[in-house]
Amino acid sequence: MTSRLARLWQPGNPQRRVFLPDFWMAVIESPSVGRNKLPRNCVKFEVDPRMSRHDIREYLTKIYDLPVRDVRTEVQMGDITWNTKLDHQYKKAMWKEEDKKIAYVFMSKDFAFSFPQMFAASEEVVELAKMTKQQEELKEKLNEQYANRNRRVGQFLAA
C-alpha cells in the first residue's frame, strides 16, 4: 500500500520501479528483568496502526531479510484527559491520545536481539561504577579479618 502515484510512462523511460510502503516501524526497548521481560529472540516494535500481521512479517523479511517466525500484535489505548471528575462519570473526555499498535516479533531460535547502545556511557557513570567496585573489594577485605574461620559447621560444641 502506497500513497505515491506512479509517474506517467513515456517512451524511453524504464518500466521497473520500486515502491516502498508508507508504513513505519520503531524498535522499543523492553525490560531486561521482571515480569515484562521478553525472550532473547523476541523484538518489540511500535508499528503503523494500519499494518496487519502479514504486513509486518513481509516488511521485515523482504526489506531487512530477518528470520521472522511469528508476529503478535496488540493495540494499546491512548491516555484520556478528563477536565473534571464528573466528566469521567458522564464520559465527556477533554482529550484522548492516539492509540498505539505494538508488535511482538518472534525470530528463529538461534536469533538473539539486544537493544542497540545509542550513546556511550558518560565519564561520571564509569567513575561511579569503579568506585562502587572498589568499595565492595574493601568491604570483603575488612570482612575477612573478622570472619571466624575456625568454626566447625554442623558439629555441636560439647558443654
Image: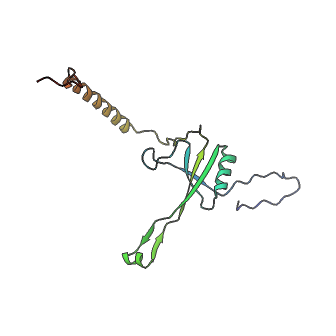
Could you tell whether 74 is left or right of 126 in the image?
right
Q: Say which quadrant the C terminus sits in.
A: top left
Q: Residue at x 66, y 58 (%)?
A: 22
Residue sitting nearer the eye, 95 or 77 = 77
Q: What colour scheme was applied to this rendering of the protein?
A: rainbow
Q: Residue at x 64, y 56 (%)?
A: 53
Could you tell whether 33 is left or right of 113 in the image?
left
Q: Position of residue 136 (x, y in %)?
A: 29, 31
Q: Position of residue 39 (x, y in %)?
A: 52, 44
Could you tell whether 5 is left or right of 69 in the image?
right
Q: Which residue reaches farthest top?
A: 150
Q: Position of residue 153 (x, y in %)?
A: 23, 25
Q: Which residue reaches farthest right?
A: 11
Q: Residue at x 46, y 39 (%)?
A: 120
Q: Position of residue 107 (x, y in %)?
A: 60, 44
Residue sitting nearer the eye, 25 or 39 = 39
Q: Say which quadrant the N terminus sits in.
A: bottom right
Occupied quadrant, residue 88: bottom left
Could you tell whether 148 is left or right of 73 in the image?
left
Residue sitting nearer the eye, 4 or 57 = 57
Q: How many marks?
A: 0
Q: Residue at x 40, y 39 (%)?
A: 122
Instruction: Judge whether 122 appears above or below 154 on screen.
Output: below
Instruction: Judge whether 46 appears above or below 66 on screen.
Output: below
Q: Which residue reaches farthest front?
A: 158
Instruction: Judge whether 98 appears above or below 57 on screen.
Output: below
